[in-house]
Image: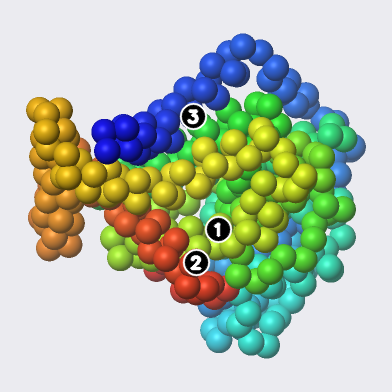
Amino acid sequence: MRALFWLLIGTVVYTYLGYPALLWLTARAGGRRPRSAPVDPASLPRVSILLCVHNEAGWLARRLENLLALRYPRDHMEIVVGSDGSTDATASVARSFEKEGVRLLEAGERRGKTSLLNDLITIASGEVVVFTDANARFGEDALRYLVEPFASTGVGCVVGELVYVNGETAVVRAGEGLYWRFENAIKEMEGSFGKTVVATGAIYAMRRSLCRPLPSAVSDDSLNPLLVLAAGYDVIVEPRAQAFENAATSLREEFHRKARMVTRQLGAHRRVGFFLKPLRLGLAVRLVSHKLLRWLAPVLLLAALLVDLALLDGWIYRLAAAGGIAGLVAFALGAVAIALGYRVPAALRLWVYFCLVNVAAMKGIADFLRGRQRAIWTASPSTR
């Protein structure tokens, strides 16, 4: 029982501290990819920016204006908008930009982002396909930074960096901002070896020749990097290619968003074959360490607490049990206080967010095991 307790705790510690430390030490030891050199604008590849939207009439014009203002040769860039069964004026807004070279594909009924992306890729004319979200905004040089690494023939996918611009206040915004700084750091360290295992849906690009039709219930930003790695190409991170978003401000919105993400990402891993046969040990370790163990962390922690309560035969186990119970109580009281609009200390806000995303991960795992896939969902209103 003692061995099991420490194994469970040690696995969680490895997930949040050990794996990042291992990446950092490996990066320090050498072997990093050199940063991409600037490319002559005339030799930049033609890119197709794919944008799937549903009922985004109030946001789409600003998003298209943002993309059209990017510092990238206009004759090397196309924007393809897919309207996923929109019932508002989304299609009309997209058509108003046709003179600017924006193309529109309308789906008569709502099918979900991944399914519509499959159709958009078939009509895209660029050598490089750029994936993004309706509520993101690109930095003016983001596209150039994102595409320049493709000058190396070994690069198959480039992942940009998502920055939350409202992360200083409120539990969800502050927590999500901290989470993404942690996540971006891990991706960047993995990318220094060309082996990043997950993209960022708001901003990433891949060679069109590597794009494959994807199942509608999986996340494109989870499955595409794995397919690129399986094909023998590198997946790297370019932190200068930045996209900006507003984090959700509602605990309920964030809970359902995180649960959906876990379900869809698990579907992506199952689809590609978890260890990508034949076995690639390094990739298997990164997949388990970066994603699977983090999703399983709440299960491991609860199991450790139950084992600890069965022990209680030493001061360290009694202290750990008291700490675990106190943490659960603090989460419950903090969540109620935040929901009622009370101000709580910053440390408690972050603890509530940490617990929230872990409970959401448990729901996401349960939904995946029950076969509840989410091809279609409602966008979080507070991110718009």
Q: How crowded is mark 2: few (under 14 residues within 10 Å), some or many (20 or more)?
A: many
Q: In this view, does 182 lie above or below 162?
A: above
Residue 183 percent across, percent down from the top left = 48, 39
Residue 243 percent across, percent down from the top left = 56, 46
Mark 3 residue type:
Tyr
Q: Which residue is drawn at 60% across and 18% down?
A: 27
Q: In which quarter of the image is the N terminus?
A: top left
Q: Are marks 3 and 1 in contact (CB under 8 Å)?
A: no
Q: Quadrant of the C terminus?
A: bottom left
Which element carries disc 3, helix, strand or loop?
helix
Q: Are marks 2 and 1 in contact (CB under 8 Å)?
A: yes
Decide if residue 45 is on the left or right side of residue 37. right
Which element carries disc 2, helix, strand or loop?
helix
Q: How far separated are the C-alphas under marks 2 and 3?
A: 25 Å
Farthest residue in the top direction?
Answer: 29
Which mark identifies residue 368?
2
Residue labelled with disc 1: 266
Residue 366 sits in quarter: bottom left
Residue labelled with disc 3: 19
Decide if residue 61 is on the left or right side of residue 213. left
Mark 1 residue type:
Leu
Q: How far separated are the C-alphas under marks 3 and 1?
A: 20 Å
Residue 278 percent across, percent down from the top left = 77, 45
Which element carries disc 1, helix, strand or loop?
helix
- Viewer-side residue, 253 vs 259: 259
Residue 347 percent across, percent down from the top left = 19, 38
Q: Is residue 146 visible?
A: no
Q: In this view, does 86 lie above or below 186?
A: below
Q: How far separated are the C-alphas under marks 2 and 1?
A: 7 Å
Mark 2 residue type:
Phe
